[in-house]
Amino acid sequence: MCLSIPGKLVAITAQLDETFRIGEVDFDGIKKEVNLSMVPDAKVGDYVLVHVGAAISIIDEDEAKKTFELIKQMGELDDLEPG
C-alpha cells in the first residue's frame, strides 16, 4: 500500500528554476529532501503531502497533524519511508 505522508517544509535547499526545487521536509523530527516540482506555490512553513519523494499537494496544518497522528497510532510510522 502506498501512502502520502504529511510534513512541514522547513527549507528550500536547491532551485534550478521557478519549477524545479528541492526542499527539506520535517516529518515529526525526521528530515528528508523532497522534490517540490509538483507544488510550485509551496513556501517554507507550508505543510505538504509527500509520496515517493515528491510533494504532491499543499495541505492545511490541522489536517496534516491529524493525519500524522493517525499514522503514528497505526504503528506504521517506523515502516514508512517518505522519500
Image (tube, grey):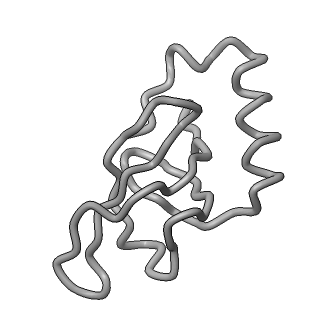
Would you place residue 19 above or below residue 44 in this image? below
Would you place residue 73 above or below residue 83 in this image? above
Compared across the picture, whether 33 is left or right of 40 comes to: left
- Residue visible at 50% across and 66% down in the picture: 44
Q: Total of numbered circles in the picture? A: 0
- Residue visible at 37% across and 51% down in the picture: 24
The percent position of residue 28, horizontal first and vertical second, equals 58, 32
Q: Of 75 and 30, which appears nearest the observer?
A: 30
The percent position of residue 39, horizontal first and vertical second, equals 48, 74
Would you place residue 26 above or below residue 30 in this image? below
Q: Pick the quarter of the image with the C terminus.
A: top left
Residue 68: which quarter of the image? top right
The percent position of residue 81, horizontal first and vertical second, equals 43, 29
Would you place residue 48 above or below residue 26 in this image? below
Q: Pick the quarter of the image with the N terminus.
A: top right
Compared across the picture, whether 30 is left or right of 1 comes to: left
Q: Residue furthest bottom?
A: 18
Residue 18: which quarter of the image? bottom left
Compared across the picture, whether 73 is left or right of 51 comes to: right
Q: Residue furthest left?
A: 16
- Residue visible at 62% across and 58% down in the picture: 47
- Residue visible at 31% across and 83% down in the picture: 19
